[in-house]
């Protein structure tokens, strides 16, 4: 069994592994150079909902139509290495999602069909990256901390980008209207934690903004929705970027272009194969995520 070696704070960890890790786990999807790209403005203006309760009720109604899905496409990963040089990786991906908590993304990187693997189930999440330059394995338990508050991205953000949005208690939300968009604002106490931008005409989510201690932390841009099943639409273009906590500058981004999105029925065998965390083998670094800390473990 892996043993703990030493504890590192993500804010202090500056190796290239840090940059790639937070592409996926702090992330979850925006413009890369400078601030996040502006959201496309609607070509037509439609009236919005009258209250947060009405808006949330429609989102919850839509959530009842969500079905398991599989998708294939291309991924563009961009990040800065330790020399502050921009790196770009473009590779094919396969994705499976079984709402509300199971997701598996597999990327063919560096001539390895599983060069990148991102996954989660109701208990755990994990990220494995095999290329020797960034060889690492990260994992954690959802029960060990509030990951949307501390990491701001990861499997949960990717699930939300696919339309599996968790809204929670209605009293934590208020509704604004900005130029053709209904904007649902979530507050935890007096601190803003999330904004959801919804096109008033088709009432599909176009942007999700995440905040950490009230400061911008991550953004997901969603576009070109495709119908997967009756009442269930998924964006075929997903752009996710995470931001530094102390300045509005992108640290890393991931862009997914999904050419095929289809409903699927998983067998128990398939669910076990896709959504069970694999044990780390052959990685240079292994880290366990506990709240805002990364604990390096031995093989």
Image: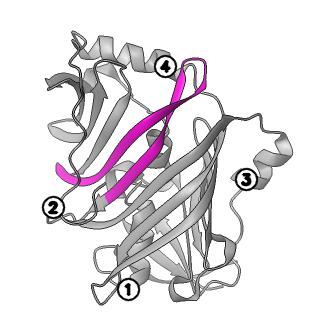
At numbered mark 1, what does the secondary structure look like: helix, strand or loop?
loop
Q: Marks 1 and 4: which is nearer the front? A: 4
Q: Name the residue under label 3.
A: 274
Look at 40% across and 14% down and name the residue there.
Answer: 58
Q: Mark 2 points at which residue?
A: 248
Q: Which mark is residue 62?
A: 4
Q: Dots 2 and 1: beta carbons under 8 Å?
A: no
Q: Residue 15 carries which label?
A: 1
The span from disc 2 to disc 1 (Cα, nearest Å) is 21 Å
Rendered position, 13 above or below 54: below
For residue 122, say whether it is visible. no
- Which callout, 4 or 2, points at the residue further toward the start of the chain? 4
Is 84 situated left or right of 214 in this image? right
User: For mark 2, does the 10 Å Cα neighbourhood hold few (<14), some (14 to 19), or many (20 or more) residues?
Assistant: some
Q: Main secondary structure of the magenta part?
A: strand
**x%, y% of residue 133?**
52, 88
- Which callout, 3 or 4, points at the residue further toward the start of the chain? 4
At numbered mark 4, what does the secondary structure look like: helix, strand or loop?
helix
């Amino acid at each position: 069994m892996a043993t703990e070696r030493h504890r590192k704070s993500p804010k202090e960890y500056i190796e290239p592994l840090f940059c790639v890790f937070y592409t996926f786990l702090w992330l979850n999807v925006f413009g890369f150079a400078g601030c996040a790209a502006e959201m496309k403005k609607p070509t037509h203006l439609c009236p919005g909902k009258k209250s947060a309760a009405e808006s949330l009720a429609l989102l919850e109604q839509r959530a009842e139509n969500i079905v398991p899905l599989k998708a294939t496409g291309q991924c563009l990963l961009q990040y800065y290495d330790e020399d502050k040089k921009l790196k770009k990786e473009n590779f094919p991906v396969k994705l499976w999602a079984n709402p509300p908590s199971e997701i598996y993304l597999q990327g063919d990187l560096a001539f390895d069909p599983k060069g990148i693997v991102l996954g989660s189930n109701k208990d755990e999440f994990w990220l494995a990256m095999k290329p020797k330059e960034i060889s690492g394995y990260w994992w954690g338990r959802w029960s060990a901390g509030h990951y949307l508050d501390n990491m701001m991205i990861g499997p949960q953000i990717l699930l939300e980008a696919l339309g599996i949005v968790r809204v929670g208690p209605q009293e934590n939300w208020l509704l604004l209207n900005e130029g053709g968009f209904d904007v649902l604002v979530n507050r935890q106490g007096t601190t803003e934690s999330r904004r959801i931008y919804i096109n008033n005409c088709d009432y599909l989510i176009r942007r999700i903004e995440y905040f950490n201690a009230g400061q911008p932390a991550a953004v997901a841009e969603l576009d070109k929705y495709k119908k997967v099943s009756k009442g269930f639409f998924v964006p075929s273009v997903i752009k996710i970027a995470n931001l530094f906590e102390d300045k509005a500058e992108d640290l890393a981004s991931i862009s997914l272009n999904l050419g095929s999105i289809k409903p699927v029925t998983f067998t128990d065998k398939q669910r076990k194969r896709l959504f069970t965390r694999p044990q780390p083998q052959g990685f240079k670094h292994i880290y366990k995520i506990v709240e805002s800390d990364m604990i390096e473990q031995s093989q």
